Amino acid sequence: MRKFSYFLYENFDPDLEKENLYNPRRILGKQTDMVLSYVAGIPAFSCSYFLCRQRFGESILLQLIEAGALRREEDVLLFDSPVFLREDASVLYSQVRARAFELAAMLEKNLPRLQSLCRQIQNGTSVEENMYHILCGMIFDGSFFDYLNQNKALATSRRHCSGLDYLAVIYEDCAELRSLSNGLLCSYNRLANNICSLQSFGDAQGSRFDFYRVFRQLEHGDTSPELLEAKRLLDYSVGGLRLNKNSLLRETAIFCQTGRCQPAVLELLELFGYAENGKICVPVYMAEHRKTIEEMKAVVEESIGRAVGDILMDMGQHLNITAVSHGVPFNEIANELYHILFGSVNEELMVRGIVSSPLLRQGEGRYLKCIEIY
């Protein structure tokens, strides 16, 4: 039996919907591996729904169809979300990585313009590290998505019958694909509201000790030893109330602007590596930096926007991979292909010394941290 990893890009509040029976996180998991393994082992448009129903029962099939992992066309059962199997790996490596090299070369031609803009951000950080956070993270894993979505090169949204809006992506858990699903610099963790964001950007080869992941772990009742100090500090009160996401972010913004905050917040920032010796020790991007970041985004769109759109539309419809053969919507396939593509571009930019190389933390993967104030 194949084993799978499930990735969700949610356009709903995971806290509000965590008890929703239709939340895909309650459906997709080890319990669905057997069904998807069976479908994966049969050529596209050859898997009988009725035989699957006899084999696995109707309930789990209906759940997978509801979650958007599978779809039924009369008696045929097909994948309906981007799925990447071991046999797709060689095509993905050869096609996507080659395109990434071309795009990095195109960007490098405009490097002087990007570096000149980056130098306008005076936050005590090197150009290379600012380029890492702005270009690799904020642009490629942020605003550039909107550009590609507006140009219909990929999808960022899919509303399901349950009313929940999300995209699901499924990877076979195998060595051949692991470096694509987890090994590339294309993963943002952000604890954010409309005031502040405590974030990290890097690969997904491990469990990061950062605010986003730890908040999720504590909410699910995880009491691992490495979380005990964070839990102790979060149990401190600020203004008579227990620290929560919004109070932590509010106090962080105040600290970045004034150098003062509640002692428990400063201890937390130091525990998670955002502050050291009473001072912020990671890049901070303030509201006044937004104009420069937008100008950098415009340079990127001008440099490679059309090329990326053309590449994604072509690969999403014609690449010889499982998802395409099953008729998965091409713009949803393109969404995940874009993650692989821009993650590969980021790796190439790092190799060329254009952006900083994130540190490898044992058991956590490679990543760098920063703070945004809005």
Image (cartoon, rainbow, N blue to C red):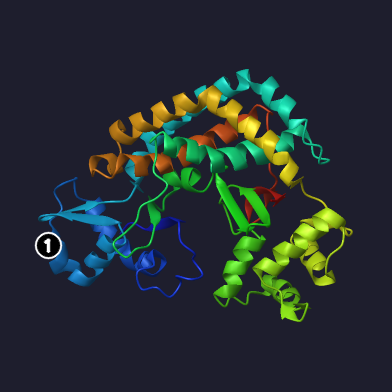
Going by the picture, which residue comes out furthest to the right? Answer: 277
- The residue at 63%/66% (across/down) is 214
- Taking depth in this image into account, of 167 and 318 the one nearest to the observer is 167
Is residue 29 visible in the rendered image? The answer is no
Q: Is residue 83 above or below residue 25?
A: above
- Of the 4 image quadrants, the one containing the N terminus is bottom left
Relative image position of residue 235 (x, y in whole percent): 72, 79
Q: Position of residue 67 (x, y in %)?
A: 31, 61
Q: Is residue 71 left or right of residue 98?
A: left
Q: Is residue 222 visible from the viewing direction of this image?
A: yes
- Name the image quarter holding residue 259: bottom right
Residue drawn 52% across the image and 37% down it: 144
Q: SS for tag 1?
A: helix
- In the image, residue 374 lies at what x, y percent? 69, 51
- Using the rendered view, name the quadrant where residue 238 is placed: bottom right
Whether residue 220 is situated above or below residue 346 in the rendered picture? below
Residue plotted at (36% across, 73% down)? 21
* Residue furthest out toward the bottom: 240
Q: Residues within 10 Å of mark 1 (few under 14, many from 20)?
A: few
Residue position for label 1: 51
